[in-house]
Image (tube, helix red, strand yellow):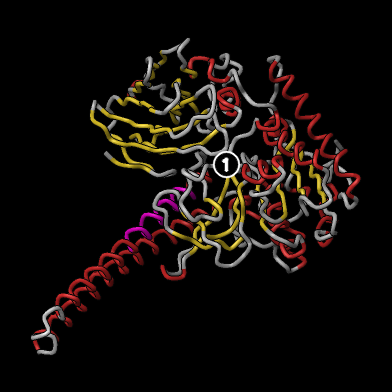
Amino acid sequence: MKQLQAGQNIPLAGGVTRFRVNAAVPLTVSALVVAADLRVGSAADVLVSDRPAGPGVRVEEAAVVVTPAEVRADAQAVLLVAAAQSGLGVVTASLSENDTAVAEFVIAPQAGETALICFELYRRGAGWKLRAVGQGYAGGIGELLRAHGADGFVAAPAAAAAAPTVLDATVAAPTAATAVPGAQAEIPSLEVGHGLERLWMIFEDAARSAAALESARGFAAERLDQELSAAVSDPATRNTPAADAARAAAQRRHDELTATAEHNHRRDSTQLLRELREADAVLPAALASWKSPAWDRPAAPADGIRLGELYALDRGALRIPYCVPVPLNRPLWVDTESSAAVAPVIGALLARLMRAAPGRRTLVDIIDLTGAFTGFTGMLAPVLAGPPITDHSDISPRLQQLVDAAELAEMAYNSGQATPPAEHRILLAADFPHGYQAADAQRLVALLARGDLIGLSTIIVGANESESGDSAVATLSRACRHLPTVTGTPLFDPWTGNAWQLDLDLLPHEPEQRARILRAESGSGDSSAGGT
């Protein structure tokens, strides 16, 4: 049986699988059958104790049984869920296939989560794979259902009875137990989509090739050390020609093994570089490099945006695009003490977000107390929801307008009258938390829970506040996807746990290219500002 870490995946044979969980508190299990956007399509896709059976999926008293061959043909994945009425504590999730144990995943939530997506069974080509997820929801099963479009089809099970207030009703950041130890910022698990999925598949291949190289290097070094120690272990033969020959042979075996591993890694990297060049020519601009012809074509919809490139100098020249889905399912938090220092990063993020949804009007709200972004905000005038905020007294009213819009959208959703967001809203909250009121952090937390209902993508700029003494600020910080800006801060891939460095994309400095990239009228279906 394989012990999985968060983000790891293994292939399945396609037989009948059985999902079970074990914890110190009573748990309920359930399953969601989802499409490529990770949302359910109907009530039949929500399997709970009150409605336990659907095509290929059955909820039993303490298990979920999935027969992959019988799952509806247009489904992308089955999410396997555990929930409790209070804190979960340590949860051990296991999966068997044809009555043989194949995987176990230990999850230790630390932020009050009462519901977890433990595993994801997902299609890969004609087959199926299993991914360890470990995504926690402090808002309980009700919040988990809403995040996947399921709360309109089923009442939340009893485990959600003690759901926290709005302040805590957010999708929790991965807990320490589900992240790679020592990570300062995490790389998310595989997000399904089209262009986004293609790039993440390339990243997964790169991660596994890197792991093979590192494993071979480690094995070769350990074996060399053992053989050299053996060669000099006997004082009587330590300085003899035989010992010299043994040492030379040990070094030769080490060099041959590492040379073979490095050759294989270079071969893999060459293939992946070829795939990346081919992809860059056809990807929408939001996911492509600045050199891509996509920036000279009419804007095309994208299921994600590119943030930068991942690399490791000791593993060669391969650089892999680091991308996330849009609208942002978790806010981006750019870690910095100076907003001005990251202005080119913010400009690049805004340019890509504006290009991601050309079929909808884009509206951008900017809080810029230090004037760090004046170098490009003028170019965004057609899509600004109002003048950039430079006075701290204007922050609360602008955030409250967004909260009010999200609450109205939630009321419509709960009444069954919801429609997909007609706009793509972008909120840039810089210099946080300096100059913000305590209630502003709570407003931002509320937008974490409801922002998707108005198509909101949020970027926060400031020092990492995950250990803040203000609970709202700390909750907000922990729920975001942090982007390090200090050179040498490692990121760890979710498949193998190997370290990577991140170079965030920068808005090009050349004025003509910058204007072309920030051409707001190309990034929106209707670029007239409509205010909030």
The C terminus - image quarter: top right
- Please tell me whether mark 1 sits on a helix, a strand or a loop: loop
Q: Which residues are magenta?
A: 199-213
Q: Main secondary structure of the magenta part?
A: helix
At a point 72% along the width and 55% down the height, the residue shown is 462
Residue 161 is a magenta residue: no
Report the side of 125 relative to 512 (left or right).
Answer: left
Residue 203 is a magenta residue: yes
At a point 69% along the width and 20% down the height, the residue shown is 413
At a point 63% along the width and 52% down the height, the residue shown is 285
At a point 71% along the width and 53% down the height, the residue shown is 351
Q: Position of residue 55 (x, y in %)?
A: 39, 16
| Residue 110, above or below 420 | below
Q: Position of residue 402 (x, y in %)?
A: 80, 35
Q: Which residue is mark 1?
A: 173
Q: Within 10 angstroms of label 1, few (less than 14), some, or many (20 or more) residues?
A: many
Report the side of 395 relative to 515 (left or right).
Answer: right
